[in-house]
Image (cartoon, rainbow, N blue to C red):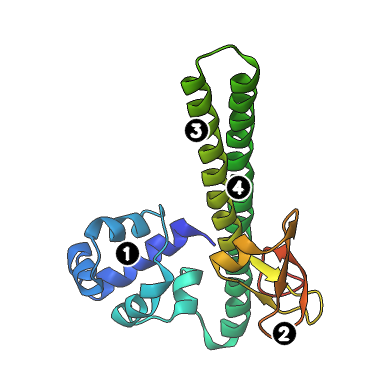
Amino acid sequence: MDQIKIGKFIASCRKEQGMTQAYLAEKLGISDRAVSKWETGKSLPDSGIMLDLCELLYINVNELLSGERIMTETYNRKAEENMLAMSREIEEKNRQMLNLEYLVAGPATIAGIVMCGIASFVDMPNGLRIGLIAFAIVLIVTVAFVAVGIEQKAGYYECLVCHDRHVPTYWQTNLAPHKGRSRYMKCPVCGKWSYQKKVLTKEAGLQ
């Protein structure tokens, strides 16, 4: 989606309704700085306030995401294009989150292992040795919990039996046996247990 185009469209519609950025922000319960970011193309409105924004600007969500008024004959095509663009953005954000999991977990795990190695083989007072090992264990465990949280929120898990794609709870994900990013869990739809694989999108065929 073209954020610059959408921003200019929001500004144009706002002015058509005779509203200032501050007035629009007040109506939506946000800061006028957020409205300014939309209109300059630095960010997009959150999905939670899109309907309220469209109501105030007398447009629909499809027009908002297109950054222009849409004629009736092209409405369905634009709607499909916008849905596809949003799916791609969600997929890319999920991919970035999963990459972040490796960036967080990898270096911290290596650092913890190195600290345990130093504590095991380097001559030092026992108190320092115990403290270093304890710190390394806490570091590895903490990062592991954070990494699982990142993985759980990014994308979906697909049941290998019925192929339903869903987001389990944090603890369901954390306590499930795993092979890489596939986790052995019970499907909420078919009730079968399987190694559910991590996927980036809700619908099959969009990845």
Residue ID for mark 1: 11
Camera-nearest label, 1 or 4: 4
Q: Earlier in the sequence, mark 3 or mark 4?
A: 4
Of the two numbered discs 3 and 2 in the rendering, the one whose residue sits closer to the viewer: 3
Mark 1 or mark 3: which is in front? 3
Q: Residue furthest front?
A: 126
Q: CA distance from mark 2 to mark 4?
A: 29 Å
Q: Are marks 1 and 3 in contact (CB under 8 Å)?
A: no
| Label 1 to label 3: alpha-carbon separation | 53 Å
Who's the residue at 61% across and 19% down the image? 118
Query: Which disc number belongs to residue 93?
Result: none
- Secondary element at tag 4: helix
Instruction: Give the residue at x 76% y 76%.
Output: 193
Q: Quadrant of the N terminus?
A: bottom right
Which badge, 1 or 4, is on the more N-terminal residue?
A: 1
Q: Is residue 31 left or right of residue 78?
A: left
Q: Secondary structure at mark 3?
A: helix
Q: Amino acid at mark 1?
A: Ala
C-alpha span from label 1 to label 4: 38 Å
At label 2, the amino acid type is: Gly
Query: Where does residue 148 sit, x and y in percent of width and height?
Result: 59, 55
Horizontal and vertical percent for residue 80?
A: 63, 78
Q: Estimate the x, y position of residue 24 in percent, counting from the top left.
A: 23, 70
Q: Mark on residue 191?
A: 2
Q: Can you say which quadrant of the picture contains the C terminus?
A: bottom right
Secondary structure under the numbered disc 1 in the rendered image? helix
**Mark 3 = which residue?**
135
Mark nearer the N terminus (2 vs 4)? 4
Q: Quick one: label 2 or label 1, which is nearer the N terminus?
A: 1
Q: Residue 101: which disc?
A: 4
Along the line of sight, the residue nearer the viewer: 177 or 146:
177
